[in-house]
Amino acid sequence: MLIILVGLPSVGKTTFSKKLSKELHKMGIDNIVLGSDLIRESFPVWNEKYEEFIKEATYDLIDKALKKYTVIVDDTNYYNSKRRDLINIAKKNKKNYMIIYLHAPLEILLKRNVERGEKIPNEVIIKMFEKFDKPGEKYKWDEPHIVIDTTKEINIEEIAKLVKDYDRINKKNPKVVDNNKDHKENHEDAKNNKIKIMDKIDKITRKVVGEVISKQEPSKIKEISKELTKLRKEFLKEMNKKLDEENIDENYFSEEKIKEEFRRC
Ligand code: ADP
């Protein structure tokens, strides 16, 4: 599977990826940590003109490695376009993917950055912090499966288990896990969210079907009602699958949105 780390410089991605890599190895999962710095640091100096090559070479490496191993991408993955590219690499290889978002307050990032010699100027981190589009903020497909506050204790064993289970189930069943909450709480949140949305979809589509049927000529009611019931069942099945694949927020499914999706179906 592909594990996509997201987080600003100094948040702790490299530290975390090394620990996760070791833990996954202990569980019998062959894995490799890859990131654009591997290529970037192979140039004698940094130059903007190398960046396109760095990006493509990193993607190629990830693509190749993914065919054999679980890959942990240790990069800021600052833009959602990069996260989308990585997800597409996973999809192309028919592999599961997980987004792990690491965060910490700005003052902590700056402090850690200074402590390790300020390789990146603090002003750059400040600008990145201000402009950062957090994963999942704009797009549902971009929602992180695991959220980690790196100022808190990180239970690496628990995270490795989640990753392993997620891949083993082999169906995209994202759980949003936040280490400010306990595991049980997170699991319950995701389950309750799905139940609530499915309940809403059930009620609204039932209503729509009822309305359509009430407008039909009596001679056609039986036939149309059979057809619509079948369609509604298929739609519920499709939505159930979609909710397993993507962790969609309850508010996203307004009555209008549900009707629109049902019409499309
Ligand atoms: P990144 O890869 O995100 O730039 P690093 O893993 O290199 O971050 O960590 C940046 C600095 O912060 C390092 O000096 C590291 O020792 C420290 N650090 C990393 N994770 C933590 C943590 N969970 N708590 C405290 N310090 C950390």
Image (cartoon, rainbow, N blue to C red):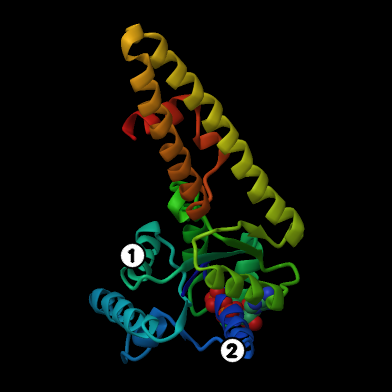
Q: Residue at x 46, y 68 (%)?
A: 97
Q: Position of residue 196 (x, y in %)?
A: 62, 37
Instruction: Report helix, strand or loop for mark 1.
Output: helix
Q: Amino acid at mark 1?
A: Asn
Q: Residue at x 42, y 80 (%)?
A: 35
Q: Which corner quadrant of the figure contains ligand 1?
A: bottom right
Question: Which of 237 and 142 lies nearest the eye of the viewer?
Answer: 237
Question: Which of 114 and 94 lies nearest the eye of the viewer?
Answer: 94
Mark 1 Cα shell of 10 Å, populated few (<14), some (14-19), many (≥20): some
Alpha carbon separation for disc pair 1 and 2: 26 Å
Asked if one can make out residue 115 in the rendered structure from this viewpoint, the answer is: no
Q: Residue at x 60, y 81 (%)?
A: 20
Above-or-below relation of 52 to 124: below
Instruction: Report helix, strand or loop for mark 2.
Output: loop
Image label count? 2
Query: Residue beneath label 1, please?
Result: 88
Above-or-below relation of 80 to 226: below
Q: Is mark 1 within 8 Å of ligand 1?
A: no
Q: Position of residue 74 (x, y in %)?
A: 48, 77
Question: Which of 164 and 239 lies nearest the eye of the viewer?
Answer: 239
Residue 92 lies in quadrant: bottom left
Mark 2 Cα shell of 10 Å, populated few (<14), some (14-19), many (≥20): few
Mark nearest the camera among 1 and 2 is: 2
Contact? badges 1 and 2 (CB < 8 Å)? no
Q: Earlier in the sequence, mark 1 or mark 2?
A: 2
Query: Residue beneath label 2, please?
Result: 28
Q: Amino acid at mark 2?
A: Gly
Which image quarter holds the C terminus? top left
